[in-house]
Amino acid sequence: MENIKEKLQGLEYSFAKKLIFLLLLKQIIIVFSDLYFVGTRYLFYDVVLILTVTPCYVFTLVSENYNFQKVGKFAVGYLMLLNIIFSILYYKDFPSVISYIFMFPIALTFYYSIRKSIYISTLFFLTIPFSLLYNYYFVDNVDKSDSLYYTFSNTYTVVCAFILFCVCFYYLIQIQKLKAVLVFLEENSVTIDPFPVLEKKEKIRLVQESFLEDIDFPIPFYEDLFSKIEDYMKSQKPWRNPEYNLKQLAKDVNSNTQYVSSAINSCSRNNFKSYLNDFRLNAFISLINNKNEEFSLEDVYLTIGFYNRSTFNRVFKSKFQMTPQEYLSSQSI
């Protein structure tokens, strides 16, 4: 599980670095195109974005451990605010602004549920009518001499937005898959965030053992845990207590019942009760094979962890297809 957490963190950091690098590269090219076509007209806007993106990129390079969720929420919120301001003020670049608006719903899903992301995006889309109204009532027509610049700028920005959208979408799928695996291992459940978003989330609890039955080898995580369980069972012999249960075993090996149960099922192909009874029956066999130790069949079941003789006989016969007395007789021949 720690390996999955490391992979998830690696993916999140990789996504942040690549996205910010692409934004910075895009803005550097825009600066040169602006200077070529319109001089310093948009220099303030360009400088603001460069000064915003550059420190963020440096931060992702030098910082080895930061909270991806908190930093990401702040960054997306700040970029959305800038987008709203510039979509109204820089009306002539309206297609460029709108192209980024459609990237934000994907970015939001990294930090919020699908439902909340769509709610925020719907409110954010109100930028479009405000920008259109402002353009219609308060702005003169675009100078023809600038038409080539706006054609290039808008086309280039829309292409960049599409590339950024693809990067976001790719990493979103990869990160969400790892998060689902992590939740499955931690909570033994899968959360379904349905669409349409007016429905409530549904959390379905799954039995990990059924998942593990389809594979031919134990998961390494469960192998390690099972080895720890085996050592504890052999050294401390807690199975001699008839009231010993799964919860107590999980506590003894510093784990939880879901992990312990899954480890036993995947590595021994038994459930907890059968696994416990195997130790008890093996102890009985050892008593029989130890010729120097005397015991009474009437009360031996108490020493190996069974509540009563009838349960002991039933479990023994289920495993060996004969009663304990018949087994003793067969050994004495």
Image: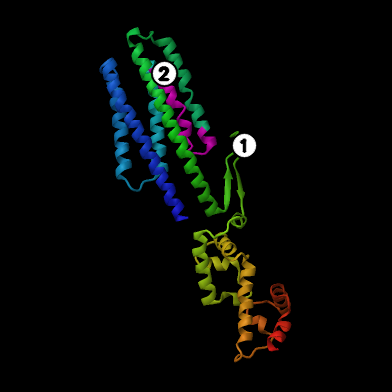
Q: Residue 11's spot in the image, x, y percent? A: 42, 44
Q: Residue 320's spot in the image, x, y percent? A: 70, 75
- In three-dimensional space, the C-alpha distance between marks 2 and 1, rounded to whole angstroms, equals 35 Å
Indicate whether 77 appears above or below 289.
above
Residue at (48, 33) in percent of width and height: 106
- Region rendered in magenta: 93-117
Mark 2 crowd level (few <14, some 14–19, many ≥20, 10 Å Cα): some
Residue at (50, 68) in percent of width and height: 228
Q: Residue 305's spot in the image, x, y percent? A: 63, 77
Left or right: 51 as drawn, with respect to 84: left
Residue denoted by label 1: 199
Q: Of helix, strand and loop, which one carries label 1?
A: loop
Residue at (35, 31) in percent of width and height: 23
Mark 1 crowd level (few <14, some 14–19, many ≥20, 10 Å Cα): few
Quadrant position of the C terminus in the picture: bottom right
Whether residue 111 appears in this view of the structure is no
Residue denoted by label 2: 94
Is residue 264 magenta-colored? no
Q: Cβ–Cβ below 8 Å for labels 2 and 1?
A: no
**Label 2 vs label 1, nearer the camera:** 2
Is residue 99 magenta-colored? yes
Whether residue 25 appears in this view of the structure is yes
Q: First in sequence, mark 2 or 1: give its number.
A: 2
Question: Taken as a whole, is the magenta stretch helix, strand or loop?
Answer: helix
Q: Amino acid at mark 1?
A: Glu
Left or right: 31 as drawn, with respect to 307: left
